[in-house]
């Protein structure tokens, strides 16, 4: 079986997840990327242009599957899969998921939920009256970058974001107050399957930095699944964030790929299944099994830089097991790196993920590890 994988920069999900999974399934993998120097053996291609992707694949050899885990390449990859008549995502669903304004419009038109959302193009004037508090964010942003909570003076907040992202469209949305949750799903031609979900802990406002995710498989799944159906989400993995407001659950964003920041590996650990293989099987046209219930508790804790400076000390890539808890530390920066705070997920120094029989023991293990193996920035 020949699998084409479109990618931008290297990620742990691809390098340590999908590529080993593809090999385990017996696939011959070709990576198409605009950064071939960063991917061993990759083929250079303008992967942001579906015509270039189709042309490259036709030249290299007919595919059995075309896949991407990149937020930025879902539409292009879906169009290429459709051209070759392969299982793939609906490109319209990919576009609506990526574009936060389109997502709101689709959900409103389907009668799923009503959330105030205003699109601001580069030359559009900021509305004079909005029901504060609101959130301003890039229309197609990632990693919580340039997402701001605004209690007054929306014009100033928009100017700040526009200076960092000239020429990009923004959205202004009503602030959704309540616990932030996720729903993880996997679809094949038999429909969507719920894998589970997480409760998300954010850092202090006005920013939206995700500091911790805790396994929380229960929740108002039917509302979220209804939203995904309205958007056309089906085949493949999908990571959806929503807030449980006083008026009911409301969608924050839909990421039409598997959850990131090492929670994909945590999800596989908790379910005890070859998650990355299952996702690829769906794209190869196979049915995936129903996931078993998790029998453990788990969390992923992001170690966030709290000051600018130079990293002087840091633990390496390691795993430990003690008192029934398995813990992994994955550094994202290195000793000698200079840290400048961005108030986004790009401030992560490392991710600690842990699984165990209960939260008390997992929390104790994470705390003990962080105390014994600190990151030092001076």
Image (tube, rainbow, N blue to C red):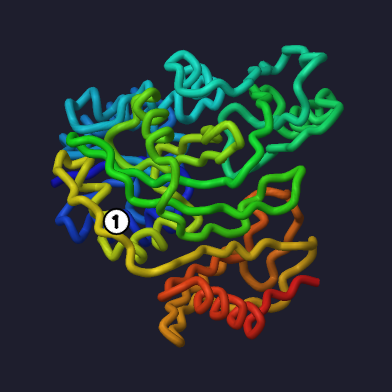
Residue 342 appears left or right of 229: right
Residue at the spot 20% in from the left edge and 33% down from the top edge: 87
Q: Is residue 337 above or below residue 110?
A: below
Give the image location of residue 291, x and y in percent. 25, 54
Rendered residue at 41%/51% (across/down): 218
Name the image quarter holding the C terminus: bottom right
**Residue closest to the eye, 243 or 162:** 243
Residue 57 lies in quadrant: top left
Q: Position of residue 279 (x, y in %)?
A: 27, 48
Nearer to us in this view, 8 or 243: 243
How many marks can you see? Answer: 1
Relative depth, front residue between 222 and 48: 222
Left or right for 289, reference 302: left
Q: Is residue 32 visible?
A: no
Q: Which residue bears the numbered disc 1? A: 275
- Label 1 secondary element: helix
Asked whether, in this view, residue 372 is left or right of residue 41, the answer is: right
The residue lying at 30 percent from left, 40 percent from top is 236
Q: In the image, residue 205 lies at what x, y percent?
A: 75, 46
Q: Quadrant of residue 224?
A: top left
Placement of 236 over or under 317, stated as above or below: above
| x and y, in percent, of residue 134 in the image | 73, 29
Asked whether residue 375 appears in the rendered view, the answer is yes
Would you identify the image quadrant in which residue 97 lies?
top left
Which one is in front, 295 or 145? 295
Q: Residue at x 80, y 30 (%)?
A: 157
Q: Is residue 336 above or below residue 11?
A: below
Mark 1 surroundings: few (<14), some (14-19) or many (≥20) residues within 10 A: many
Query: Outermost residue toward the front?
Result: 246
- Relative height, residue 134 to residue 40 (above, below): above
């Amino acid at each position: 079986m020949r699998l084409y994988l479109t990618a931008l920069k290297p990620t742990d999900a691809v390098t340590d997840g999908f590529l080993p999974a593809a090999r385990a399934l017996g696939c011959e993998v070709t990576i198409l990327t605009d950064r071939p120097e960063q991917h061993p053996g990759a083929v250079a291609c303008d992967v942001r242009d579906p015509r270039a992707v189709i042309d490259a694949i036709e030249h290299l050899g007919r595919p059995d599957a075309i896949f991407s885990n990149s937020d930025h390449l879902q539409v292009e990859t879906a169009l290429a899969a459709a051209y070759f008549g392969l299982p793939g995502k609906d490109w319209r669903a990919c576009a609506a998921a990526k574009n936060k304004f389109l997502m709101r419009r689709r959900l409103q038109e389907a009668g799923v939920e009503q959330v105030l959302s205003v699109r601001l193009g580069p030359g559009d004037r900021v509305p004079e009256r909005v029901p504060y508090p609101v959130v301003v964010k890039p229309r197609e942003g990632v990693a919580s970058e340039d997402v701001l909570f605004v209690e007054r003076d929306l014009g100033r907040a928009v100017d700040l974001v526009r200076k960092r992202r000239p020429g990009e469209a923004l959205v202004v949305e009503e602030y959704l107050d309540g616990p932030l949750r996720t729903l993880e799903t996997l679809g094949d031609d038999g429909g969507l399957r719920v894998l589970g979900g997480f409760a998300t802990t954010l850092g202090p406002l006005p920013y939206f930095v995700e500091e911790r995710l805790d396994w929380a498989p229960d929740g108002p799944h039917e509302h979220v699944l209804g939203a995904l159906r309205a958007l056309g989400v089906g085949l493949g993995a999908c990571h959806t964030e929503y807030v449980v407001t006083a008026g009911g659950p409301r969608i924050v964003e839909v990421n039409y790929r598997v959850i990131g920041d090492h929670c994909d590996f945590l999800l596989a650990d908790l379910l005890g299944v070859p998650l990355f293989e299952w996702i690829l099987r769906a794209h190869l046209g196979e049915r995936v099994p129903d996931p078993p219930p998790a029998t453990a508790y788990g969390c992923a804790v992001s170690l966030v830089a709290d000051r600018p400076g130079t990293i002087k000390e840091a633990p390496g890539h390691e795993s430990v097991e003690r008192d029934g808890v398995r813990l992994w530390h994955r550094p994202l920066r290195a000793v000698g790196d200079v840290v400048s705070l961005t108030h986004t997920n790009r401030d992560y120094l490392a991710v600690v993920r842990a699984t165990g029989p209960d939260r008390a023991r997992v929390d104790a293990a994470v705390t003990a590890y962080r105390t014994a193996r600190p990151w030092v920035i001076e």
